[in-house]
Image (spheres, rainbow, N blue to C red):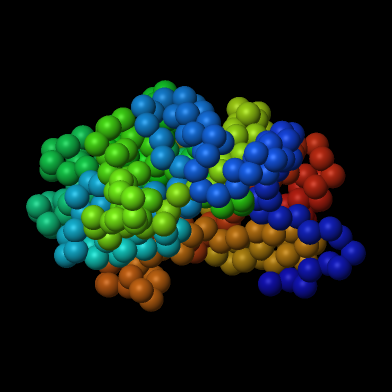
Amino acid sequence: MGVPSREKTRIFLSPPRLAGNEQRYVREAIESNWIAPLGPFVERFEAELGRVAGAKHCVALASGTSAIHLGLLAAGVRPGDLVAVSDLTFVASVNAVSYCGAKPVLVDSDPETGTMSPERLAEALERHGNKIKAVVPVHLYGMPCDMEAISALAAGAGIPVVEDAAESLGSSWNGRACGTWGASGALSFNGNKIVTTSGGGALLTDDEATEARVRHLSTVARVQAPWFEHDEVGYNYRLSNLLAAVGCAQLEDLAPRVARRRALFDAYAEEMARLDAVGQKEPEGAFSNRWLPAFFLPEKRLRDRLCEALAAENVESRWCWKPMSLQKPYADGTASPVANDLFDRGICLPGGIEVGSEEWERVRAVLRSV
């Protein structure tokens, strides 16, 4: 990589952005002494998230990973089961499967979106039969999977879908929010997400039994008693009231955030065309929040040269996710030629800047210099 310029301020890939009311709401939480897990801001955050996503129920949790984990447990995934998961993803998607004692079956990508290929999923379901107990499609960088095709395949096999919508708050497929197509959906509010609580997540569901099960498991499976009574192994997975206060403020600015990221992606697309690079295609019916602008260069060598040029100007960029089938914990001989190719040629560009800003002009100058 290039040597970063010490004279230029660092441009980060996706830094948090304050909406305006974070300090006010956090101050309210502190002044009311509600800083521990649960409290009025948690309830408010859950209600607002459910409204924004169009989900009947929402459970605020410690991370997106914990939401996937509990979603799988609530869906009945048990030790020894198989779970079909997108190969091109962040490791949390498959780690959650392992937490259940299950084994991921890694599914290759669609070549234009990078998301789970319905055709490859159909092959996996046919190959493994009724051993697969759930499907975890990942809405990659905010780009929705083909949820109608995936849902139909899962329904035909009689298995639930647990969506990894960690990167896709504000995204939808045919007007229906990502995270609301399956038995449950997981959101992330990590510091780099389009909306953040600094660290946190949530589970969306329309099923009352799933909500009750997840709430129970996320509060260490405690039952009502004058003492601490637990009826099974549970998890300390709830979001704190203090962090939920931050999330409430962030949600107030969701629509403008999505609009800015989409405008930025379009501006990048115009510049990247000079390098014969293509961005994640937005299929008919898809609406992506464009959380991270992901592009695919014609060849790995050009991608690497661009990364080096950006680094030399103190601009953060990142290769696309390394497929799980190439990662030591999950390398099992799975062949995912599309995911591997996208990893070799893909780059994520800074998504937290605005078109027309000084930061944008710096990044654009690098793109035009390669």
Q: Is residue 298 left or right of residue 108?
A: right
The residue drawn where x is 39% and y is 70% is 326
The residue lying toward the viewer, choosing from 192 and 344, is 192
Residue shown at 55% from the left, 49% from the top? 36
Q: Position of residue 206 (x, y in %)?
A: 31, 30
Instruction: Tell me the residue at 90%/64% (across/down).
Output: 7
Q: Toward the viewer: 167 or 370?
A: 167
Residue 304: image location, x then y, percent: 62, 66
- Residue extending farthest to the left is 130
In this view, the residue farthest toward the bottom is 328
Most foreground residue, 189 or 370: 189
For this view, does 326 lie left or right of residue 120? right
Does 206 appear above or below 114? above
Q: Position of residue 166 (x, y in %)?
A: 46, 46
Residue 140 in view (yes/no): no
Name the outermost residue toward the right: 7
Q: In the image, residue 54 lies at what x, y percent?
A: 41, 25
Q: How many marks?
A: 0
Which residue is at a point 63% across and 44% down the rendered structure image?
Answer: 33
Can residue 305 be seen? yes
Is residue 297 left or right of 77 when viewed as pictured? Answer: right
Report whether 101 appears left or right of 363. Answer: left
Q: Quadrant of the N terminus?
A: bottom right
Q: Does residue 81 lie above or below 167 as drawn? A: below
The quarter of the picture where the C terminus appears is bottom right
